[in-house]
Amino acid sequence: MGAAATGASAHTQYGTPTPLDRVIPAPASVDPGGAPYRITPGTQIRIEGPREARRVGEYLAELLRPATGYRLPVTDRGRGGIRLRLDDGPHGAEGYRLDSRRSGVTITAREPAGLFHGVQTLRQLLPPAVERDSVQRGPWLVAGGTIEDTPRYGWRGAMLDVSRHFLTVDEVRRYIDQLALYKINKLHLHLSDDQGWRIAVDSWPRLAAYGGSTEVGGGPGGHYTKAEYTELVRYAASRHLEVVPEIDMPGHTNAALASYAELNCDGVAPPLYTGTEVGFSSLCVGKEITYDFVDDVVREIAALTPGRWIHIGGDEAHSTSHEDYVTFMERVQPIVAEYGKTVIGWHQLTGAAPAEGALAQYWGLDSTSPAEKAQVAEAARNGTGLILSPADRIYLDMKYDKDTPLGLSWAGYVEVRQSYDWDPGAYLPGVPGSAVRGVEAPLWTETIENSEHIDYMAFPRLPGTAELGWSPASTHDWDDYRTRLAAQGPRWEALGIGYHRSPQVPWPTAGG
Ligand code: ACM
């Protein structure tokens, strides 16, 4: 396809609607045809369903009002217009059907999450100018036809490391909005590490007050109060994302060890740490107070977290003996279960005995040893589900190339094609397809300090992970993908997202 010549901005400028299949993630099935629908000053958003459906309608109206300048009332009366319908059809927990014709657009789903994902598709079918916050010229056309869509995987995640550099509630909310546009449904918050403890724990107040008081480079750090964390959980839920909180243990714990001397085997608190080395810290596996600490922290965080999962880390415990690591995980996993949650850990957890129902998050590389991959595969065959986050594919903190001004390169350079062009279902040898529960793109923040940095590292790679998680393997095609990705550029410009203009993507020329 001649991407530059047929770019979305060129089309929409002359009133030709975006083709139904030019969205990310690629829909499961598309049947184009018929006259387009046009949003007009008289368009209404009609809701057939309970309050959660109405909330999706209000969200859509708020999205469309600034650029269209239309009133777009949300109502449960009348016919035509944009209709959001819940029924008990075959769309599963997150799927939807979008039907567009001259008389209206109807999105049908079984659950509000499906309506929400359908709304993101509708949004991408409208011209990029719809994202602007002042009135723009239309026309606001939606191509005719039908989309039937349902995700490949139930876990489509993004991780933010708020420990190495603290990110404010506003910065996290901004990222949540960006994730929602691509149907990401899990926000994994890496809330503790050597450089900072980022959530208030009432029973151990120095964790946040002291352990959160700095960050990489020595800045002031910060932490979320319980009210702020609750607001992040609420905001994520309003975008149909579930927050997965991580307390990384037994390594990556210097901020906790610095806050409470009694957590150290020698009873001496180390100083706060603002460097970027890994692997030097460990909770004291032989001390009973360690498990009182874990119990309190897990209990308090579980109480604030409506989702199913608590991430217990478990990576790079280089200062914990293997025997201690196994003992620690045997003690800690039941604590998570006791508070009604299910364990997820980094894939080193498969070196211990993962609890029933646990997930392991694989973050290795192509070059990871066959023995380590085999250990993960064996756990997967024994029932441990896998979330795939290969560092040389979807770590968003890796540099794109040698000239990238931010990021690390220990897993190599990760350009857009490298990040998109692999199959989660066939990635790790010896792993049954059914063991793969999804994908997640982590963003570690040793070099990332604010939203501008997040934008640059996440775009344009994040949509590739979203597509790997959502779209059927049969739609996977780099040449088609890069054309669709190119069409997202003007949308990011409208949203104020400063993205990396990867030379692998045929971006429309400015003003094209
Ligand atoms: C990791 O990158 N240490 C999970």
Image (spheres, grey):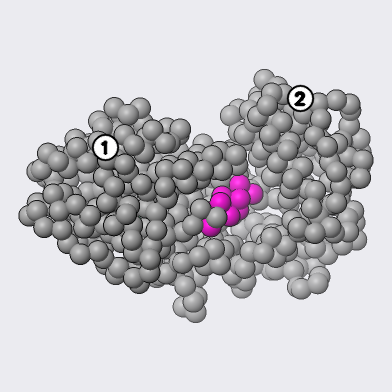
Quick one: SS at disc 1? helix
Question: From where the camera sits, is residue 44 visible?
Answer: yes
Query: What secondary structure prevails in the magenta region?
Result: helix
Residue carrying label 2: 48
Q: Which quadrant is home to the N terminus?
A: bottom right
In the foreground, 7 or 366? 7
Residue carrying label 1: 296
Image point (53%, 57%), residue name: 171
Quick one: SS at disc 2? strand
Image point (76%, 59%), residue name: 132
Amino acid beneath label 1: Asp
Q: Where is residue 310 in the image (x, y as percent from the top left)?
A: 36, 39
Q: Is residue 129 left or right of residue 340?
A: right
Q: Is residue 172 left or right of residue 492?
A: left
Q: Quadrant of residue 35?
A: top right
Q: In which quarter of the image is residue 95?
A: top right
In the foreground, 407 or 227? 227
Q: Does the magenta stretch include residue 172?
A: yes
Image point (65%, 33%), residue name: 114
In the foreground, 84 or 235? 235
